Amino acid sequence: MSNSREQILAKVRANQPQDERPLPDLSVFPSRSGELQDQFMTVLSLIGGKAIKVANYAAIEEYLRSNPYNGRMVTSIQELNSIAKPISAPGDPHELADVELAIISGAFGVAENSAIWVTEANFVQRATPFICQHLAIVLPAQEICANMHQAYQRLQGQTYNFGVFIAGPSKTADIEQSLVLGAHGARTMTVFLLEN
Amino acid sequence: MSAVSTLKHPALSERFNADEPRVDWHDATLWWIREKRDKAAHTLYEDWESLRNAASAIKDNVLGNLADYLTQFEQNAQANGVQVHWAADAAEHNQIVLSILKEAGAQRMVKSKSMLTEECHLNEYLAENGIDVVDTDLGERIVQLAEEGPSHIVMPCIHWKKEEIGELFHEHLGTPKGNADPQLLTEAARQHLRDKFLTRRVALTGVNFAVAETGEFVVCTNEGNADMGVHLADVHIACMGIEKIIPRREHLGVFLRLLARSATGQPITTYSSHFNKPRDGAQMHIVLVDNGRSQQLGREAFRNSLKCIRCGACMNTCPVYRRSGGHSYHNAVAGPIGAILAPNLDLSKYSDLPFASTLCGSCSNVCPVKINIHEQLYEWRQELTRNGKVDFGKKTGLKIMATVLSNPALYRSMGKMGRWTLRHIPGMVNNSLNPWFKQRDMPEAPTESFREWYVKNRK
């Protein structure tokens, strides 16, 4: 096996072009300011998600009480423990199989595509945002950047074991290009934009 | 994929073309996706061309420094606790995957989409060795149940009608007979595959991008099947071609802006998962596969094909692909990009593919990493001719054409003869011996050529 390693590397070294090939300057992609929150909400609705502006955690709780999910609710957010159970420390992920709603906190959102960056630290168990039937992410409203270049500037130098951009609910169009929400992951995605 | 066919692109296309309404439907579906791609690109009108230039330049840099990036990636991935394997070819790749499964004591595995494993015929190999593999991407699962290969790298069952999928699911998953509702069929697949996710201990995924700087790799899906597989398994195997390396994390910004927009017209895939370290108590393996890539790197005219990020835009736009279907390319990767990648692996077997093109250049125009696909198709044709891989009929025809086109007097008299024949004895050309007559009526012959008209009317 290590023999293959040496062989491959030797062949690549022999065959790779020798001319100077500088990396491009990514600062040519300007950060466009504008109504980032509006853009984020518009794109989110286009990709099948739902955004709700809330003033505080109490408003989220109130929303969930008046729009109840019938089944097990878990959260990694302490402020919401009155309505959802904490996600237990890392253990067997199969234990989450019957979760109806998972509420996790998002680090930041991206206006151009409504993707929200979350890491393992935000949801304890890696399987959480995928295995739940419905997903809700709490995102501080001011934590929205314009595009993916800005997103990776934020991630510059950060370490995470597992991180993921999530943009809307799980979906597929594999059957005659008919869009169906809820392929294997969450069937719906609600974003609570926390205003303060 | 299972049946090894020796038929070439023209014969396989003819088979696909037998059902004309289906061809029209296939053509229109793919064109619709091409249009979605255009709209998505236009939303970034200020940045789109700069993004393509940047993506192409990053990949240029990768090709020039691939060996160093590979070792940097290996080092960082190992430091992250990931086990790195190297496979010189498809056979070694398959053996490595099997050995990991054996070590884990697993007889069953879930797998998300990986064109590399299609290229290596991993499923067949594992089946021969008693391993049960379930493809979990909906489209891949459909073609797997139907015992065939994907016909498109992004939309594996784009050639299937929903009524046929309804029938297939009725047979395999017990959905109600005659029901072809995509919602119902997708739900049935969700339930069927959820059981697999919850019971398999090994999950395999492909890799979209691997970052040398950090040792992390990124997997993009809409369905969430890659994540459902790996986060519920004890062992994650990620298989990647060595050309998937990118230098730095910030470069993901460029590629993730381009990938989904080019592929399906979405602003980004639902999930862009970044894997750095295995979960506590779980294993993560990366298999780095060459399988002809280092050789292609040495072919100056063709090395840019290694920039491909597998978005499928070149297929959706290709007038030949849309009307001949993915299976007519008899290769894991179909369409224009497949036609420039495949001859590197087997010049004789894929000698037909560079000719499955009109050289219109649409593929190059939509390519997010600016691969000169149509120019490479033309280059391959010359390479094939030099190597004696072009059949006698085509060679003779082209020779005659070259003689006629390079001799004005001969060209004029042949033109005259042709017009006369079309007018007076149309049966000479309107017959099955003339391949041009197959799908079209021959044109009505004008009474004079443009030159004759011009000579007469010139003032």
Image: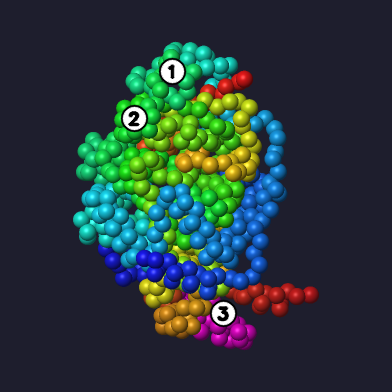
Query: Magenta stretch containing residue B417, yes or no?
Result: yes
- Mark 1 is on which residue type? Asn
- Expressed as whole percent of the image width and height from the top left, the position of residue B182 reads 35, 38
Asked if residue B248 shows in the view, the reply is yes
Mark 1, residues whose alpha carbon is within 10 Å: few (<14), some, or many (≥20)? some
Label 2 close to label 1 by CB (< 8 Å): no
- What residue would you read off at disc 2? A96
Taking the spot 57% from the left edge, 64% from the top edge, the residue there is B65
- Expressed as whole percent of the image width and height from the top left, the position of residue B332 reads 38, 61
Q: Which element carries disc 2, helix, strand or loop?
A: helix
Sequence-earlier tag: 2 or 1: 1
Asked if residue B312 shows in the view, the reply is no
Splitting the image into 4 quarters, where does residue A149 fall?
top right
Comparing B4 with B296, the one in front is B296
- Expressed as whole percent of the image width and height from the top left, the position of residue B151 reads 38, 56
In magenta, the rendered stretch is B398-427
Q: Is residue A137 left or right of residue B156?
A: right
- Tell which tag, 2 or 3, sits nearer the viewer: 2
Q: Which element carries disc 1, helix, strand or loop?
A: loop
* Residue projecting furthest to the right: B459
Q: Which element carries disc 3, helix, strand or loop?
A: helix
Mark 3, residues whose alpha carbon is within 10 Å: few (<14), some, or many (≥20)? some
> Chain ID for label 3?
B
Magenta segment's dominant SS is helix
Splitting the image into 4 quarters, where does residue A126 fall?
top left
- What residue would you read off at disc 1? A81
- What residue would you read off at disc 3? B415
Distance from the alpha carbon under mark 2 to that under mark 1:
17 Å
